[in-house]
Amino acid sequence: MRLLLALLMLPVLVPALARAQAVRVPGPDGLMLNSELYLPHGAPTGPSIVALHGCGGPLPRRDADWGRRLAAMGHVVLMPDSFGSRGLGSQCSSEVRAVRAGGLRRLDALAALKWLAARPGSPPGGVVLMGWSDGGTTVLATGRVAPDLPPGLIRGLVAFYPGCRVFAAQARYKPAVPLMILIGEADDWRPAAPCRALAEKLPGTVTLVAYPGAYHEFDAPDGKLTLRTGLATPAHGRAHVGTNPAARADALRRVPAFIAALP
């Protein structure tokens, strides 16, 4: 009897087993972006989502976990690979990057957003853009008010531990739609202070969620706290990464709630 009850509860306890479909999305300058597409079981019941990887490229245990969870909630989720599509590996140790958050990655994001918005069956009202680390920084760069951002293309922005310093220093920076930033107070790779300054400058538009004691990649499942070295940023080349169970659990609730509340 207990086993039967456990089996009946399994779909609730574990994200629906949505498998990623490999798709190719037209990107800038004729490039085809290798991407993964997660589909809900049945018709979508929430806005479509483009999710952007960090400086290391796709991180399956984190990215796929979010993709499956969001698909189980009724979202179509597209994850383009900006680095692998160009024959590049991790960029975390690269001092000079050809594919930067404010450059080619932004163009990739715009292309992915347009493709997903035009996909048959994609709900109207705009696509949500989210990302982690360098992908989170790309979210801030892509979602700003700019002449080449089509009205209505983006519905909301979610950035996990982005680099906020440049944007906080820009007097005219403003997101075109609501932006939520999630970051660890202990993050020594992308400090929380510039993101707090950005949120204080743009109240009502930017929502900051800062988790005490949490480091970079706090939302990745089952990640042991480790010290990474050889990084291009921060200046000392070292930073901690690892799961914070409390912060992860809160983010898993807070992000879907933020998306559901978008106008």
Image: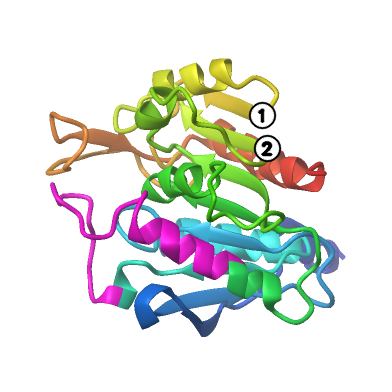
Say if 56 sits above or below 95 in the image. below
Task: Locate residue 73, reporting x and y percent.
Answer: 77, 60
Asked which quadrant contains residue 90, the reply is: bottom left
Q: Is residue 46 magenta?
A: no
Which residue is located at x 61 percent, y 35 percent? 180
Asked which secondary structure carries label 2, the reply is loop
Compare marks 2 and 1 and give the one earlier in the sequence. 2
Quadrant, the N terminus: bottom right
What residue is drawn where x is 16% and y is 50%?
A: 93
The number of numbered discs placed on residues in the rendered structure image is: 2
**Which residue in the protein does label 1 denote?**
205
* C-alpha span from label 2 to label 1: 5 Å
Residue 217: which quarter of the image? Answer: top left
Q: Residues within 10 Å of mark 2 (few under 14, many from 20)?
A: many
Give the residue type that dot 2 points to: Pro
Q: Is residue 5 left or right of residue 103?
A: right
Q: Amino acid at mark 1?
A: Thr
Instruction: Please tell me in which quadrant of the rendered image residue 262 appears.
Output: top right
Q: Nearer the viewer, residue 63 or 77?
A: 77
Queried whether the magenta region covers residue 98, the answer comes back as yes
**Which SS type dominates the magenta stretch?**
loop
Q: Position of residue 140 (x, y in %)?
A: 49, 42
Do labels 2 and 1 touch, CB within 8 Å? yes
Q: Is residue 155 visible?
A: yes
For residue 140, which numbered disc appears in the image?
none
Image coords of residue 44 (percent x, y): 81, 70
Q: Residue at x 22, y 67 (%)?
A: 89
Front-lying residue, 75 or 229: 75
**Bounds of the magenta span?**
86-113
Which labelled disc corresponds to residue 178?
2
Q: Position of residue 164 (x, y in %)?
A: 41, 31
